[in-house]
Each structure stands twice: as structure tokens, then as C-alpha cells.
Amino acid sequence: IGAVMRDYGTDFLYDTTPSAIAKRADGRLEVTLFNTHSNQSHTETYDTVVYAIGRSADTPGLNLEAAGLKSNALGKFVTDEEERTNVPHIYAVGDVLEGKPELTPVAIKTGELLARRLFSGSKVLMNYDLIPTTVFTPSEYGCCGLSEDEATARHGEENIEVFLSEFMTLEFAATHRERHPKHVGEDGMNDLQPMCLAKLVCLKQEENKVVGLHFVGPNAGEVTQGFHLAMKLGAKKKDFDDMIGIHPTDAEAFAGLHTTKASGESWLNVGCGGGKCG
């Protein structure tokens, strides 16, 4: 994603921390940037500065300790698999849970499942291992399930097989989109480089059950949403192989993933989007 954004013209400053911001007479912002690698500082001027600092749960003012509730330094609660806090009759869902994704659809679904268990006799628990989500960067990243590292840590490297393919979306390949002018000609290349990646993380001892799906490319959210259902129903690599692709889409790549990471072979593919031409 970083390489794609760079080709688009985005500048990244690595190992760099803003140390001061001063407003100039013209209203622009002069930012002092400290490089932690060289221990040198320099200034740059911007129209806008945006802080991405994360967030904490706004729970301290609720006086929950009077009910015996315990929270961490960020105001979040540790719960069991049924969303029960340290006080057995008090439950918590959503962004106030420690170690759980801060995603609205996850909060909604967790609340629905909790209500059904409390009032309708349901036994269904929230499955935090199968949450589809997307990062809406210029080339989006969508995922569902475990990352390769998580799957390896949980099941052992010898039990994990990774299938993947890197390619260029057809709408860009057909029009020969060029890099930003300041990067044209680098490495002898003018066109944008492959911007899509399809990846399946599979569990060998369960007939290559798909435990992680990852996609980088346009409309990753749309691609990932549908595959969430397949994974929820226990899809295996063979089920993906048996799919009929919609040609020439990016999602079609998941119907033809044959290169494994362990093979050492290149997973770069040239075709029509995620599929094969001809």
C-alpha cells in the first residue's frame, strides 16, 4: 500500500517525529520534524496538520467503580467469552472491550448476540476470529480471519500453507496509468506497479481450511464482505478452487491461487485483472 501511494505522489517521512508546530503570519503551519535515525531536525510548511492519535474509552466519569467494575488505564474492560465483566451481572460490548476491534458493526453484532443469549435462550457467541474489515487507503486493504503471523503462532508454522498472487487491476493495466511525475522513470519504469494482492492463509490439518483472507486493491471492502460468509461456513481452499470466477474482476484471483509462499516461486501474475486472459 505504501508503494502504491508513493507512486501516486504521496511523500512518506520515515523515522520522523513532529517536535514543534508554529503558525505563520499567512496562517500556514511550520512543522519541525526530528529524524530519530540521523538525530537531525528540519522544518516543512503545510496548510493542515492532522493528528492520528487513537482514542480511549470515555468511561471514567461514569463512577463505575461504585458498582465494583474494574477497567484498565484506557477505561476499557476485560470480559469473558460471553462479554461478562468482573461483576457477573454486568456486561460490556463494543469499543470499551480490551483487546477487541473498535468497529461499529462488531459492536452491533456483539450486542445483538448478547441480547439473544440473555432473553431468547440463544447460545451463540461472538466469533472474534472471523471479523471482516477494511482499511480505506487509496489502494484498499481488506481482511477476514487470522493474519499469517497469528495463524502461525496459534497452529505452528508447519501446519500453515499460504497461497498468494500479486497483479495489476485491469482498469489500470489497460490504460497504462503512469506514476506521479516525480517518480516516473525510477527503476526504468513509468507505469504504476502491480497494486493488488490476494492471499489465503490455510490450515493444513483441516484440509486447508481457510483461516485468513487478505486482499489489497480497489474496492477491497466489497470483495472481503462476500468472502466472510464463505469463511463463516467453513470454506476450504478446494472450495475456492471450485469457484467460477467473474472475468475480468480482481476478486477472480481467489478462484485461481496456486502459488504457495513456501515454494519460493514468484507470485507476480500478468493477466486480465485477477484472472487469466484468453
Image (spheres, rainbow, N blue to C red):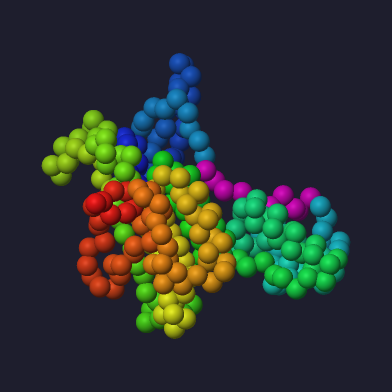
Answer whether residue 37 is visible to the viewer in this image: no
Left or right position of 93 against 170: right
- Image quadrant of residue 244? bottom left
Quarter-wise, where is residue 203 in the image? bottom left
> Does the magenta run of residues contain 117?
no
Q: What range is drawn magenta here?
A: 52-61
Query: Looking at the image, which residue is at 79% across and 50% down?
Result: 61
Quick check: 55 left or right of 210? right
Residue in the picture at 31% in, 59% down = 165
Residue 166, how many percent across, how many down? 30, 55
Percent position of residue 26, x then y: 45, 16
Q: Residue at x 60, y 58 (%)?
A: 101
Q: Is residue 81 above or below residue 257?
A: below
Q: Position of residue 145 (x, y in %)?
A: 51, 65
Q: Which is nearer the eye, 8 or 123?
A: 123
Q: Is residue 11 above or below residue 104?
A: above
Residue at 33%, 39% (x, y): give it: 171
